[in-house]
Image (cartoon, coloured by chain):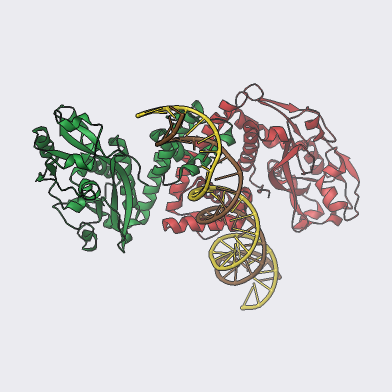
Chain colours: A green, B red, C brown, D yellow
Amino acid sequence: MLALKHLRLIEAINDCGSITSAARRLFLTQSALSHQLVALETYYGVNLFERARPLRLTAAGELLLALSRDIMPRIEAAKRDLARLVEDKQSGKLRIAVECHTCYDWLMPAMDAYRTNWPEVEMDLVGGFHTDPIALLAEDKADLVIVSETGKQKGVVFNPLFRYEMLALMATAHPLAAKSHLTARDFASDVLITYPAPDRLLDLIRRVLKPAGINPERRYAELTIAIVQLVASRKGLAALPAWAIPSYLERGYVVARTITRRGLWSGLYAAAREADAGRAFHKDFVTTLREQAFMNLPTIEPLA
Amino acid sequence: MLALKHLRLIEAINDCGSITSAARRLFLTQSALSHQLVALETYYGVNLFERARPLRLTAAGELLLALSRDIMPRIEAAKRDLARLVEDKQSGKLRIAVECHTCYDWLMPAMDAYRTNWPEVEMDLVGGFHTDPIALLAEDKADLVIVSETGKQKGVVFNPLFRYEMLALMATAHPLAAKSHLTARDFASDVLITYPAPDRLLDLIRRVLKPAGINPERRYAELTIAIVQLVASRKGLAALPAWAIPSYLERGYVVARTITRRGLWSGLYAAAREADAGRAFHKDFVTTLREQAFMNLPTIEPLA
DNA sequence: CAATTGCATGAATTATTTTCATATATGCTT
DNA sequence: AAGCATATATGAAAATAATTCATGCAATTG
């Protein structure tokens, strides 16, 4: 009766605090997880979670969580060993290209974590800006590309990583700081500071300002820290991922606000050549990216 | 992909040396196990067993077997802990009745093994001979009865333990020792030495001699050692479970022969009240009986 | 107190697992 | 070496199990 999926279920619900969000992380529906949990609880005749939000483990649940934390790493290690036994050891190579500038924040720790499990895989970062990073796969200049959109390109597989909220950044004393959330029109009368990227890669412009016909004055900066500095100096507004902001907010020169009432959410995906995507060291890299992101970036959400 | 059933599969095949016999132990068909194994091997792209009889683990198989031996005991322990957390701790009580005299040989070590996992369960042996041991369950004089036949009694659940061969025992110099196997007629002209039990409980009589209309002169002994002594003293023939014999054969005064060409095989079952049979400490006792039997009795076979 | 969000649940659907019926080895015995 | 007994492999059918869909119900929030 007890299966590995049940252990994963318990870990996910415990981490996420709700069945709904755990379902997104496990790429299943809320209903499926609810059925699984109820079945397990019925079988053993105990509740594993107290049904209060956020869901909290009972003693019985803690017991299974402890089991999971004990054995799951051993199982993952064995699967890696098995894959290493089978695959051609030489060919483990991961040239990684990143579309989004801020991504390095979480990519570096993820690469470190991965290296301990796959020391023989050679990792490299593909530098420079590329208008069509996906093309790097076909050109054999990259093996894995992190992008903000899925697409249907033959021979290329997209794996969802996580979704995150884009927050508007403004100087502490800015008049818009009084609002709980900003709308498209709020951006009309101020300078917008962005990375020097095409508009189609800037979610705020593509999904909020352009549909509203708003086209603010622009200013560009290469580095996140420079963007924040310009905002603090009252040179304009910016939009950055929620997980890139906390360290800057601390200083008190800038504040962050939700964009539109429901928030502006974007997703990140790992793209790879179909031929590579099936290989164990590849799949494990994507899994590690996801795990490490959820571990290090508190504000992100699973991406269905 | 890798599931606990796969680990159990690998352990079973490794222990049994063949898929067919592993299938009996896991209460599945040979086909089901073959499909499972092929699927697993295909998924990882390695053979886990060399296809020569007996099936031998490859390096990849060894890796998974090591994983299994590492984590399965932890999982079983966690399940026990969970059951203990849930069940009424006081009521763990196992009064065990045994129909077959020779059973004590393997029952004792099994009870010892069980006690280490369930120290709080109170175990007792119901002594004396009973014409209808199953009735002890309804009379609440026993909680678990080990019998050689299943039956359809309402409120009683039968769990198969294992099957074993009954061998004919005769003095070394006995003329029948020249034969590779004995038939019903071979028993006609000699005394048959048995336990003092009703004929319906003696497989040799019920299933071989009675159908052939053969009714040999009888002599009775309470203890296995006494039966062997009488046989060695050329007082007659006996039939004993194959697993009870090896220690006596060593001395060289008696020899064992198969009964009928295909051998005379019997089964053992654990019977319990339906209400008890579902409880964790009960189920685990039956599992332990089975495991310990297979560990200690080399000649037995799984029982479908 | 309406609106929102999250969990539970029965029925329908989809996917997986097992069995059945054979085909295909692999030995062993004569 | 042929024939017999025993084992594994495999495709198709049957049986189970897992997942989704649609929706109800409860708790929480503005």
Which image quarter: residue A23? top left
The image shows residue A120 at horizontal and vertical percentages of 26, 50
Residue A112, picture quadrant: top left
Q: Is residue B135 visible?
A: yes
The foreground one among D5 and C30 is D5
Q: Looking at the picture, tell me which residue is in the foreground, A65 or A236.
A: A236
Task: Name the residue located 16 percent from the left edge and 34 percent from the top edge.
Answer: A170
With respect to residue B90, does C6 lie above or below? below
Left or right, B60 with reference to D16: left
Q: Residue furthest top?
A: B90
| Tally of numbered discs | 0
Query: In this rendering, is residue A18 above or below B203?
Result: above
Can residue B55 be seen here?
no
Q: Is residue B84 above or below residue C23?
A: above
Q: Where does the image place residue A295, in percent across and percent down from the top left?
A: 31, 36
Q: Position of residue A180 (x, y in %)?
A: 25, 31
Q: Position of residue B26 (x, y in %)?
A: 61, 48
Which residue sits at x=44%, y=40%? A8
Residue occupying the point 56% across, 31% down: B80
Looking at the image, residue B262 sits to the left or right of residue A25; the answer is right
Q: Nearer the viewer, residue B18 or B229?
A: B18
Q: Which of these two is toward me, A269 or B242?
A: A269
